[in-house]
Image (tube, grey):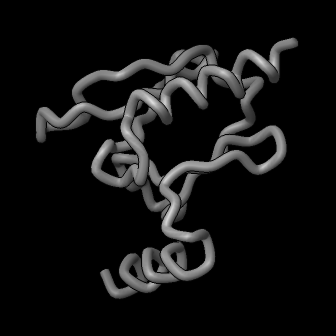
């Protein structure tokens, strides 16, 4: 648990508190469900099928779902976003469209 707190604090200091950002052609985000692979997940944009807003987990809070081309999915919880969920979703969809052109 201490490791998770330290990694979260590191993000606040060095990533300006962001929960999602683009790093080249990769989407980097703090996922809803921590899997032991690290505090952040990085997915190539070419592997993403689409994004949508949906209920995330058991909290019934809405978040941004990431649907991957391999049939798996992940989620970014809304409470971690600095901007409104709809604004972030629009930017993610624009980045996805640009990566496909």
Toward the viewer: 32 or 71?
A: 32
What is the quadrant of the N terminus in the image? bottom left
Q: On the rendered structure, is 37 left or right of 32? A: right
What is the quadrant of the C terminus in the image? top right
Residue at left offset 60%, top offset 29%: 92
Question: Height in image: 59 above or below 86?
Answer: below
Question: Height in image: 24 above or below 69?
Answer: below
Q: Position of residue 9 (x, y in %)?
A: 45, 82
Question: Height in image: 98 above or below 21?
Answer: above
Q: How many marks?
A: 0
Q: Position of residue 95 (x, y in %)?
A: 71, 27
The quadrant holding residue 16 is bottom right
Q: Position of residue 41 (x, y in %)?
A: 57, 51
Residue at left offset 28%, top offset 50%: 79
Q: Position of residue 80 (x, y in %)?
A: 36, 54
Q: Residue furthest left?
A: 59
Q: On the rendered structure, is 57 left or right of 18? A: left
């Amino acid at each position: 648990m201490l490791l998770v707190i330290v990694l979260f604090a590191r993000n606040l200091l060095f990533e300006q508190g962001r929960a999602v950002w683009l790093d080249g052609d990769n989407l980097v985000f703090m996922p809803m469900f921590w899997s032991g692979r690290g505090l952040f997940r990085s997915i190539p944009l070419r592997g993403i099928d689409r994004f949508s807003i949906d209920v995330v987990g058991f909290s019934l809070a809405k978040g941004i779902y990431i649907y991957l081309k391999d049939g798996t999915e992940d989620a970014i919880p809304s409470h971690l976003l600095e901007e409104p969920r709809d604004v972030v979703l629009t930017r993610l969809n624009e980045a996805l469209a640009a990566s496909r052109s």
